[in-house]
C-alpha cells in the first residue's frame, strides 16, 4: 500500500486531465498538428571533392600509391616510433580506436598498417586533391552541424561487411596531449550494434624533439651546400649548368616567397584556408622563380653570378629553415595494444554493455599512454631528485 505524503498526495480533481472543448456538432476538436521542425541544411563546402552520397568508396588501385605517399608524408611531418603492429588483425571486422591530439592522428593510424581501414573525417577536410585522396581511401564525411546518422550507419555497415574501421572515441581534438580524455559512447555503440570482433587500442603520444649537436650540424651543412652549389655553378659552369642551377634555386626561393605572400593575403582566418593560399602562392612563385632563374643563368654568361648569388642565398635560407624543421619535428610515439573482444560486452546488452566497454577501453588506453610516458621520460637518478622536506 502506498502511503500518502505531502509530496505525493493530490486531490483527485487536480489529477484529472482537462476536458477538451466540444465543437457545435458535439465532437471534440482534433488536436492541431505542430509544424515539423525544419531540418538543418547541409553545409556547403567550397571546392568539395568528397563522396556526393556521403558513403565510403574505396579505390584499391588509387590506394596502391596513396598509402606509400601517406607514409612518406607522415615521416616528413613526425618522427615516429611504432610498437605493437602485430596486434592489428590482417582481416576481419575490427575497430582501431585512437586518441585525438592532432590533425595528423588519422594519417599516422593509416600509416601503421597496409590493410584497408576506413575512417570518418569532418566534411570540411574533403577539398581539392586531399579530398579526392581521402575519398579514394574510403573515408566517410561528417557534417558536424547536421543531425545525421548516416556516417554512423555507414560505419556499422562496413563492420557488418567484415571491413576494418578507425574511430576516435574522444570525439574531437584535445590540446592536452598528456592524458586520454573522456570517451563518448558512439564507438562502443557502433561495435556492439555491428559484427565487430574486437576494438584495438592505438595510443599516440606526441613529444617535442630536442635537437642534438648532430642535428644542428646537418642543418647548417644543408644550407651551406645549397648556397655553395648555386654560386659554384654560376662561376665555373657552362650555360646548361648555370640554367639548371638557376631553375632549382629560383624555384626554391620563389616558392618560399610566393607561399608567404599567399598565406598573408588569404583573408579567411581558418588555417586550412591559409594553407591552401600558401600552396597556391608557392606554386606560382616557384614557376616564376624557375623561369627567371633559368633564363638569367643561361643568358647572362659571366654576369650570371648577379642572379645566382641572391637566388642561392635565398635557397640556402629556405634549406636552413627546412632542415631545421625536419630535424626538430615532433616525435610521435605510437603503441598498439591487444584487441578487446566485443562479444562478452554484447552479451551484457544495452546500456550496461556499452558503458562497460567504453570504460574498459578508456582504462586500457590510459594504461598504455602512461607506459609510453614512463618509457620515454626515464626518472632522474636518485642524486638529482629533490630531497623530501618531510623525510627525517
Image (spheres, grey):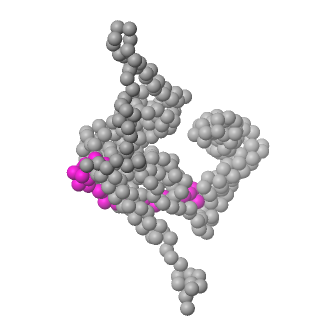
Query: Which residue is pictured at 28% across the width and 43% down the height?
Result: 193
The residue located at (52%, 27%) in the rendering is 44
Image height of 208 relative to 390, above or below:
above
| Quarter of the figure with the C terminus | bottom right
Q: Is residue 344 magenta?
A: yes
Residue 376 at least partly seen:
yes
Residue 218 image point, x, y percent? 60, 62
**Number of marks in the rendered image:** 0
Query: Is 77 or 287 nearer to us in this picture?
Result: 77
The residue drawn where x is 37% and y is 32% is 13
Visible residue check, residue 289: no
Residue farthest along the top direction in this orientation: 25
**Viewer-proximal residue among 103 and 60:** 103
As displayed, is residue 99 above or below residue 272? Answer: below
Nearer to us in this view, 330 or 227? 330
Q: Residue at left 34%, top 47%?
A: 4
Give left or right: position of 158 versus 41.
Answer: left
* Relative horizontal placement of residue 320, taking residue 61 as reference (left or right): right
Closer to the camera in the image, 167 or 115: 167
Taking the magenta stretch, the answer to whether it contains residue 114 is: no
Residue 228 percent location from the top left of the image:
68, 55
Q: Residue 102, image x and y in percent?
A: 51, 51
Which residue sits furthest bottom? 392
In the image, the segment drawn in magenta is: 326-351
Position in image of residue 135 (x %, y %):
41, 35
Amino acid at each position: 500500500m502506498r502511503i500518502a505524503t505531502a509530496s505525493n498526495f493530490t486531490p483527485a480533481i487536480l489529477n484529472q486531465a482537462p476536458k477538451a472543448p466540444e465543437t457545435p456538432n458535439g465532437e471534440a476538436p482534433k488536436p492541431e498538428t505542430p509544424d515539423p521542425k525544419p531540418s538543418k541544411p547541409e553545409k556547403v563546402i567550397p571546392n568539395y571533392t568528397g563522396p556526393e552520397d556521403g558513403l565510403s568508396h574505396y579505390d584499391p588501385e588509387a590506394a596502391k600509391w596513396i598509402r606509400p605517399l601517406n607514409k612518406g608524408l607522415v615521416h616528413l611531418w613526425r618522427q615516429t616510433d611504432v610498437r605493437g603492429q602485430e596486434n592489428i588483425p590482417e582481416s576481419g571486422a575490427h575497430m582501431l580506436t585512437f586518441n585525438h591530439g592532432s590533425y595528423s592522428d588519422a594519417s599516422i593510424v593509416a600509416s601503421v598498417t597496409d590493410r584497408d581501414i576506413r575512417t570518418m573525417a569532418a566534411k570540411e577536410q574533403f577539398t581539392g586533391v586531399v579530398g579526392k585522396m581521402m575519398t579514394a581511401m574510403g573515408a566517410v564525411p561528417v557534417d558536424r552541424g547536421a543531425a545525421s546518422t548516416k556516417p554512423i550507419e555507414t560505419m556499422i555497415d562496413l563492420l557488418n561487411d567484415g571491413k576494418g574501421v578507425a574511430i576516435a572515441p574522444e570525439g574531437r581534438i584535445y590540446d592536452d596531449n598528456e592524458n586520454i580524455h573522456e570517451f563518448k559512447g558512439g564507438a562502443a555503440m557502433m561495435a556492439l550494434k555491428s559484427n565487430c570482433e574486437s576494438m584495438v587500442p592505438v595510443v599516440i603520444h606526441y613529444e617535442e624533439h630536442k635537437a642534438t649537436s648532430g642535428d644542428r650540424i646537418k642543418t647548417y651543412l644543408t644550407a651551406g651546400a645549397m648556397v655553395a652549389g648555386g654560386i659554384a655553378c654560376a662561376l665555373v659552369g657552362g650555360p646548361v649548368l648555370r640554367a639548371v642551377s638557376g631553375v632549382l634555386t629560383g624555384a626554391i626561393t620563389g616558392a618560399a616567397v610566393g607561399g608567404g605572400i599567399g598565406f598573408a593575403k588569404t583573408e579567411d582566418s581558418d588555417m586550412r584556408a591559409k594553407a591552401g593560399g600558401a600552396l597556391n602562392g608557392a606554386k606560382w612563385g616557384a614557376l616564376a622563380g624557375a623561369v627567371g632563374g633559368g633564363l638569367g643563368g643561361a643568358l647572362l654568361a659571366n654576369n650570371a653570378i648577379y642572379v645566382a648569388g641572391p637566388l642561392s642565398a635565398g635557397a640556402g635560407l629556405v634549406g636552413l629553415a627546412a632542415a631545421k624543421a625536419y630535424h626538430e619535428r615532433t616525435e610521435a610515439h605510437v603503441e598498439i595494444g591487444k584487441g578487446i573482444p566485443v562479444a562478452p560486452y554484447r552479451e551484457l546488452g544495452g546500456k550496461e554493455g556499452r558503458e562497460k566497454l567504453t570504460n574498459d577501453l578508456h582504462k586500457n588506453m590510459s594504461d598504455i599512454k602512461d607506459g609510453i610516458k614512463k618509457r620515454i621520460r626515464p626518472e632522474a637518478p636518485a642524486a638529482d631528485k629533490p630531497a623530501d622536506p618531510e623525510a627525517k
